[in-house]
Amino acid sequence: MPKPRKHNKRLVADDGARATLARMVTSQEISSVVRAILFAESREVWRGVVATPPASLLEVVLAEFLRATPVAAELPFMSTICLVAQYLCEKGAALVMEDGRKVQPDFYTVLLAPSGEMKSFSQSRVLEGFELGGWKPSRIRDAGSTAGLMEELRANEGKATFWWIEEFGQFWKQTVSEAHQGTPRLLLMAYDHATLTKCLRDSVLEVKDPCLSLLGTTVFANLHNQLTKEDWASGLCQRIAFVFCSPDPTRNCFDRRYAILDGVSLEKIANAFRKATETPVHTNYRFTADARSAIGDSWVLMGRQGISADFVRRIEFRAFKYALVYHWLLGKANNEIDKEDVNWAVRLAMLHLSDLRRIMDDVEYAELQDLMRRAEGLRLKFGKELAPRHLLMYLHRQLKTMPAAEALYSLLLDKEKAALAGGKASPLLSDCAVAITVANNTAASPTGNAPPGDARRPTWGAG
C-alpha cells in the first residue's frame, strides 16, 4: 500500500495564524492583505470583462452563453482561451525568446465550480462550435494509468495534444495509487517539454518534446480533500491555473428561459471562429521592446501581492503564452507581440493571482479564520468589555503573545465596523494587494497603461 501523504507542509514557512498576526504588527501591506481576505465581498460586474477584447471571438462566445444560459462566465471564457491556445499549438505557434528558447502556448488549467453548474456542458458546447467552424482538437483518451498516459503520448508524438479531464479532483486522488503514481512526474516533465522515457521489459519507450495541454474541471468544495498542502507546494500544482467559476447571482438558474438550454448559437460561434482563423499563425513570434518593458512593470506589480515567487513566476510565464493568444484573438497578422497584447495577457494573469490568493486563503488562512470565529464568540460573551487580554486569556495556546492578541482584536474591530457600514468591505480594502481587487476593477490596466478598446461592462452582460 502506498504511504499516505503528509499534511504538515505549509506554503509559507511559519507558525500559522499566530505568525500572520505577528507580521501584521510590523507590515501594513500584510495587514491590508489579511483584512481583504477576511472582509472582501464580491461585486456585481463580472470580473472577466477586464480580460475580454471587444468584438473578439472570445466576446462572441461569452455573449452566447450569457444570453442563453445561467452558467458561470468563467467556464466558456477559459474553455475558449484554452481551445484557442490548442489551435495555435497545433499550427506550430511559438514565442521565440532572446536566448533562442521557444515557448508554446500549452496550458494546464482546472476550472473550479460547484456541483451541477454545467461544467461539461459549457466546455462541450464551445468545442462543438469550433468543430462546426472547421477545427477539431487532437485529443488523447483518458488514461487509466501512468503507462496508459505514456502510450497515448507516444502514439501522438510530434503532435500537440489536448487532454480533457472532467473530474480532475478524482483523477488527482488516483495518483496515490500504484497505477497512477508516476503520472504527476510525467505531467511535470511534459509541461517542460522534457523527453519522456519508460523502461519496458525488452525496450525503452521514449517521447521527445511532448506538447500537452490539459483542461480539467472539479468541484471546489472537495478540492482540499483531494489536494494536500504538500501538493500545493509541488512544482506541478504551481504550473496549473485553478480558476474559480462562481455562479452569477444576477441570473436565476430557475428562470424559465434556462429550462431547455438549447439557445446557444453554435453557428455564431462557428462563424466567429472561421473569421478568426483568417489571421495567420507564425512559428517565430517575438516581443517588441515596449512589450518587454510592460512585462517588467507587471512583474514588479505581481511581486507586491504577498504570494511566494515560485507561484508568481509560473503565472508570469503563463502570461507570455497568453500574450500570444491575445495577439491572435485581436486579429494581428504580424509576428510581433506588442504592449497591447501584453496588457491583455497581464489582466488575465492578475485574475489567476486573485484566485490563487483565494486558494491560499483556504489552505493557509483556515486557522486564522477559525481564530476570528472564536474571537466573535468571545465578543458575544463579554460584549463591549472584550479586550485583547481576554483574547490572550482564552486563546493563549494559539496566540501566546499580547501583540498577536492585539492584532486579532484589531481585525475583529475592523470586521464589526464594516458590518455597521452596511456590510461593505473595510476601507482598508482599497489599500490591499492589486491581485485581490483587480479582478473586479474594470477601469485600470494592471500595467498602468490603458488597454485598447472599451473595457466597460458590455451590453451583452445585462439581462
Image (cartoon, grey):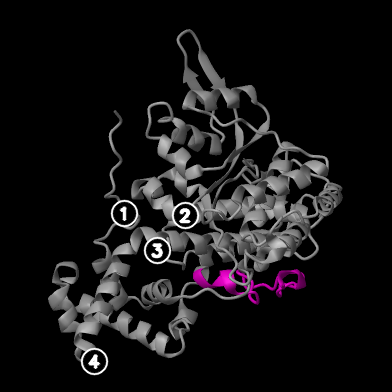
Residue extent of the magenta highlight: 436-463
The secondary element bearing badge 4 is classed as: helix
Q: Residues within 10 Å of mark 3 (few under 14, many from 20)?
A: some
**Quadrant (top left/top right/bottom left/bottom right) for the C terminus:** bottom right
The residue positioned 74% from the left and 40% from the top of the image is 283
Mark 2: which amino acid? Phe
Q: Are discs 3 and 4 less than 8 Å apart at CB? A: no
Q: Main secondary structure of the magenta part?
A: loop
Please give the label number shown on residue 361: 3
Residue 345, image quadrant: bottom right
Q: CA distance from mark 4 to mark 1?
A: 36 Å
Q: Amino acid at mark 4?
A: Lys
Marks 4 & 1, CB-CB < 8 Å contact: no
User: Mark 4: few, some, or many residues within 10 Å (few <14, many ≥20)?
Assistant: few
Q: Residue at x 30, y 31 (%)?
A: 2
The residue labelled by disc 2 is 220
Residue corresponding to mark 4: 384
- Labels 2 and 1 touching (C-beta < 8 A): no
* Of labels 3 and 2, the one closer to you: 2
Residue 230 in the image: x percent, y percent? 34, 46
Q: Secondary structure at mark 3?
A: helix
Percent across and percent down for residue 36 are: 43, 75
Which numbered disc flags the more N-terminal residue, 2 or 4? 2
Disc with the residue nearer the chain's start (2 vs 1)? 1
Question: Residue at label 1?
Answer: 10
Residue 157 can be seen in this image: yes
Query: In the drawing, does residue 273 fall left or right of residue 286?
Result: right
